[in-house]
Amino acid sequence: MKKIFTIDYRDIVLREFQAEDLEELYALTLQPEITDFLPDWKSSKEQRRNWLLNYEIKENKDFLEAVPNIKDNCLRLGIILKETNEFIGWCCSGIKDELPYPNREISYAISKDYRGKGYTT
């Protein structure tokens, strides 16, 4: 059985992206409240599936294997509502070219339906 990296916190769990997240992740990337701030996340479902299965999940494995020497690896975690096990957003960390190395960007997005509830405070 594969061990999945998680961070358990109050009403939510942060966990590695999974292939099963595709539908909910894709739906989130269509919300203008998200794409207005993260236009690079807008894609077709086929493109999102390719990124999720062939890049994002693989990069998570690379990141976790590299700890504590993470260097340029990225980590992408889904924000999962404990009560329903629903994928309601994401939190990511990676190198950003605009920041002096080795500073990392931490970004997140949460569904419009779950804003203002303290999940990303």
Image (cartoon, grey):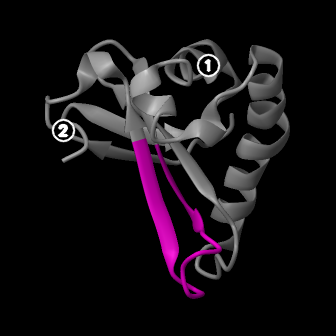
Q: Which residue is mark 1?
A: 26
* Residue 89 appears anywhere in the view: yes
Is the residue 48 above or below the residue 61 in the image? above
Magenta stretch, residue numbers:
91-108
Determine the secondary structure under disc 1. helix
Pick the quarter of the image with the N terminus.
Answer: top right
Task: Determine the residue positioned at 56% across, 25% down.
Answer: 29
Q: Position of residue 32 (x, y in %)?
A: 45, 22
Q: Is residue 80 left or right of residue 93?
A: left
Determine the secondary structure under disc 2. loop
Choose between 55 and 103: the one closer to the eye.
103
Of the residues under marks 2 and 1, which one precedes in the sequence? 2
* Residue projecting furthest to the left: 117
Res 9 quadrant in image: top left
Q: Which residue is mark 2?
A: 10
Q: Position of residue 70 (x, y in %)?
A: 64, 76
**Residue 21 among those drawn in magenta:** no
Please name the amino acid that badge 1 sits on. Tyr
Please name the amino acid that badge 2 sits on. Arg
Q: Position of residue 94 (x, y in %)?
A: 59, 64
Is the residue 103 above or below the residue 95 in the image? below
Number of the label disc, if any, that sits on residue 80: none
* Residue projecting furthest to the front: 36
* Residue 17 appears anywhere in the view: no
Task: Determine the residue positioned at 52% across, 41% down.
Answer: 38
Is the residue 52 above or below the residue 93 in the image? above
